[in-house]
Amino acid sequence: MSDRVANLELIAARCRRNVVRMIETGHSGHLGGAMSAIDVLTALYFDIMRVDPARPDWPERDRFLLSAGHKAMGQYAVLAERGFFDTSLLDTYGAMRTALGGHPDMHKLPGVEANTGALGHGLSIATGMALGLRKQGIAARVFVVTGDGELPEGSNWEAAAAAAHHGADNLVVVVDNNDLQISGRVSDVMSMAPIAGKFAAFGWATREIDGNDMSQVLEALDATPFESGKPSLIVAHTVKAKGLAFAEDQAAYHYWKPKDDELARAVAELDARIAQLENSAKQLEGAVK
């Protein structure tokens, strides 16, 4: 494993712990999607995107939109770890007038580019941003994370057609494809498979990866745009509630209101994972010396 991958895996583990830290404070939250998308969010904010936490409105920055706004705890966890705001703010989750609402609010939190959570709207906003940046001659890219459960919304496909027609190759969409939404399997509620095939039919360049394998996440994002003149789509196959063995791949943990014993188990599991990765990093550093 490369140092690059090992470092990002450790950061992702800390971000997962940040998600549970917010649930400890707020007593509930959308756990499942936040945990499944953490690896992609970590790679974007810590390695791929050009961002400056000290200048969140820097005109040349890359933009990120979390179309699946209910995964907001994942974005908050990563933004805090990246330095957009102090991690102590995470302890306000669930409090009155907190900046950390159930969905991201660009008016309250640095690093949030748009208010999202009306599912299916993020891709439309991102397409407009990508075309607008190109019109202004700004060589920035726009990244979007959608959920597979929001793809049946028709607005996604209007945006997909427009992005391809206008050759928006500065636009990258990652579908967090965990096959679960609040009411059950996406494949049972309303399947959009094959996702990559549908986007390809609209004129996108596509790839499919294991979205919880940091090596694969980096390899795919490094390769974007996959084709000049085409927007890029990555179908990231992930596991809902990834990182908590007792909760993984269960619709019941889409939204989690934990009991004390379950919360203690989650904290212990994540702390153990962080300690394991930190020890591995020390051993690797010692071997290099």
Image: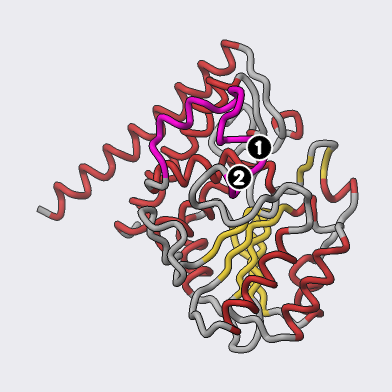
x%, y% of residue 15? 46, 40
Q: Nearer the viewer, residue 128 or 241?
A: 128
Identify the amino acid type marked 2. Answer: Ser
Question: Which element carries disc 2, helix, strand or loop?
Answer: helix
The residue segment tinted magenta is 85-107
The residue pinned by badge 2 equals 36
Residue for point 64% across, 66% down: 173
Residue for point 54% across, 64% down: 63
Give the crowd class for mark 2: few <14, some 14-19, many >=20 residues within 10 Å: many
Question: Which element carries disc 1, helix, strand or loop?
Answer: helix
State if disc 2 and disc 1 touch (CB < 8 Å): yes
x%, y% of residue 243? 53, 36
Q: In the picture provided, is 181 more to the left or to the right than 113? A: right
The residue pinned by badge 1 equals 32
Q: Nearer the viewer, residue 168 or 221?
A: 168
Q: Is residue 172 magenta?
A: no
